[in-house]
Amino acid sequence: MVVASPLSVLPTMAGDLARLEEHLRAAVVADDSYLTEIASHLIEAGGKRVRPGFSIASAGTRHTDAIGASHEVLMGGVAVELVHIGSLYHDDVMDEAEMRRNAVSVNARWGNLKAILAGDFLLARASEIAAGLGTEVAGLLAATIGQLCEGQILELRDTYNLDRTEADYERSIAGKTASLLATACRVGGIVGEIPRPDIEAVTEFGHAYGMAFQIVDDILDVVATDEQLGKPAGNDLLEGVYTLPVLRAMHTNVGDELRSLLGGEISLEARERARELVRSSSGIGEALDSARSWADKAGAVLTSLPDSASTTALLAAADHLVRSAADPLA
């Protein structure tokens, strides 16, 4: 994302995330220092820690007073963040990416084989931590890893497919993105021992937020710069992954030229022309409307929760998300 998350409005969040960062680094220390270096690479590169932030905030939705997160809640956040980072290691191998978070990607620095194994190591550590938090959390995290794989497979199946449907796109992003954000909230709710109806509410929030999150990310891939993204912009078009703004643009006045450029491997020049076409169409605005709709759904499900700093922070995150996509369009 281009703009930082507003979860810092939660009074204790900065302190909680600082403590989480320590646990996150400790979780990837291996017996061998070489593996530790590789496994720590993206952790050291930084990140907004949206997923563990959601775990912490979800656990705190019943607290009207500002209190710090428990050790168990922090470790739940560590587990979901390790799954996220491990999946990035694998994604960068598949995408042949050279940059991630404005740093050299793991695969570019150490090679694909080490990146894959280090990603597996991070997933294993996440599973080990989840097991220590109870069978429900362990089962949930295992199922989520499966959903991540399913969503990615669905995306790969439609590579270079000019007839990819919006329904197939939504199924893919529900698995590869929304599932982990929903799980982050649910883990926080379970470990934080909030009431079951509240757990269902924050889970639904995470799913809806995750759908909006991925649509926004796909919009930014078309409209933002490399520097804003911290990775090459327009990479989806090069990889043959046609996202919502592109799918919508194909049904506008630029559709014929856009389809003539896509459908197979393309040059950098063709990619830039395709980005120009999508930006000039109504596809960006329509995709932004879809993201806004999902963000509104995310906010709506939180109305059943008590007023608290954590609930306010989650609501702010949903509102801020869509504005972060609109900023580069100004």
Image (spheres, rainbow, N blue to C red):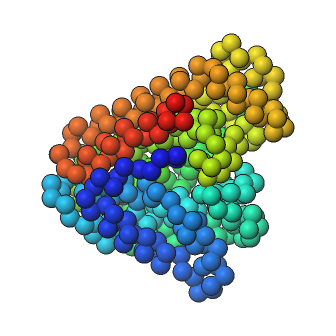
Q: Residue furthest top?
A: 253
Q: Establish if 191 lies above or below 9.
A: below
Q: Residue furthest front?
A: 330
Q: Can you tell which quarter of the image residue 78 is in?
A: bottom left
Q: Position of residue 22 (x, y in %)?
A: 42, 75
Image-based side of 35 in relation to 66, left or right: right
Q: Position of residue 76 (x, y in %)?
A: 38, 65
Image-based side of 260 in relation to 118, left or right: right
Q: Residue furthest bottom?
A: 31
Q: Residue shown at 81%/27% (left/top)?
A: 261
Q: Position of residue 210 (x, y in %)?
A: 46, 43
Q: Can you tell which quarter of the image residue 316 is in?
A: top left
Q: Establish if 1 lies above or below 165.
A: below
Q: Residue shown at 56%/50% (left/top)?
A: 148
Q: Establish if 219 lies above or below 257.
A: below
Q: Residue furthest left?
A: 64
Q: Residue shown at 64%/70% (left/top)?
A: 118
Q: Nearer the viewer, residue 308 or 132?
A: 308
Regarding residue 113, the answer to whether it shows in the image is: no
Q: Nearer the viewer, residue 251 or 274?
A: 274
How many marks can you see?
0
Q: Position of residue 231 (x, y in %)?
A: 65, 51
Regarding residue 114, the answer to whether it shows in the image is: yes
Q: Establish if 78 lies above or below 9.
A: below
